[in-house]
Structure formats: structure tokens, C-alpha cells
Image (spheres, grey):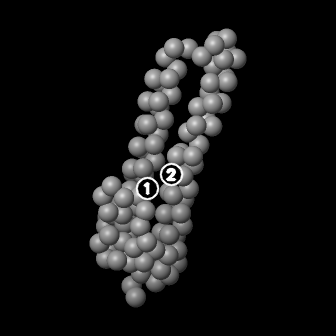
Amino acid sequence: MLADSSPSMRHDSPTNAAQGWADLDRRELIYVCVVFGFVPALLIAMLAATALFGDVPSWFGWAGGAGGMAVFFGASAYLQGFRCPRCGERFFAPSRNTSKACAHCNLRRGTASPSS
């Protein structure tokens, strides 16, 4: 388990808050890459399957769809697991992957000093 996902891990100084926001940016980048990279990755996998097997196997759609959904839900859960630098609670409200402020303490996103 990552140290940042611990509820007791708080970023009380501006430097640590900046690390927290950088962590959120990284999590969002992973999420966006998964969302927008699924179709190109599936097309590349189809080309590779065609090169290896001469045609796309009949099970390929099920495997690609199930694998894509698993990766999407994993990336979504990783993004949802981000904890607020001030209060240590989950930053996002349940079922929302976008927010400009903490769902619990209303800390605005990107705030340099979480204690202010």
C-alpha cells in the first residue's frame, strides 16, 4: 500500500502539499491515459493478433473488453483513492472523479498552504 493513501498521512507544510497536488496530477494523468488510450491500444493489439494468428481470434473481443474494463476501474479507483492534503479524507465525493475542492474540508485544489 502506498504511503499517500493512508488516512493518517497529511501534508501540513506547503512543500508537502505541493507533493500531494503533484500526486493528484499524476493520478489524473494515468486515468486520462487509460480512458483515451483504450481504443488505440485495442487497435494495436488487433494488428498484433492478426499478424500472429492470421485473423483476430473469436475470443479477442471478450478479452479486450474485460481487460479494458478492469484497467479502467483500477485507474478510477486509484484516482478516487487520493486523500486531501489538509484533512486526510478522500478528496473526491463518491462516484465523482472531478472536483475543485475537497468533499470534506472544502480545501481548494492546488492550494499551497493547506492549513490556511
User: Is mark 1 in CB contact (under 8 Å) with mark 2?
Assistant: yes
Q: How many C-alpha atoms fall within 10 Å of the one at disc 1: few (<14), some, or many (≥20)?
A: many
Q: Is residue 7 above or below residue 101?
A: above
Q: Position of residue 103 (x, y in %)?
A: 32, 70
Q: Is residue 56 above or below residue 74?
A: above
User: What residue appears at the point 63 percent right and 19 percent down from the top-left corner?
Assistant: 49
Q: Is residue 84 above or below residue 56?
A: below
Q: Position of residue 1 (x, y in %)?
A: 39, 51
Number of marks in the image? 2
Q: How many C-alpha atoms fall within 10 Å of the one at disc 2: few (<14), some, or many (≥20)?
A: many
Q: Secondary structure at mark 1?
A: helix
Q: Is residue 71 above or below residue 63?
A: below
Q: Which residue is mark 1?
A: 79
The Cα atoms of the two marked residues, 1 and 2, are separated by: 7 Å
Label drawn at residue 16: none
Q: Kindly identify the amino acid type of the residue bearing the numbered disc 2.
A: Tyr
Residue 76 visible (yes or no): yes
- In the depicted view, which residue is nearer to us: 1 or 40? 40
Q: Which residue is mark 2?
A: 31
User: What residue appears at the point 45 percent right and 43 percent down from the top-left corner?
Assistant: 72
Residue 100 lies in what quarter of the image? bottom left
Residue reaching furthest to the bottom: 116
Q: Position of residue 78 (x, y in %)?
A: 42, 52
- In the depicted view, which residue is nearer to us: 62 or 3? 62
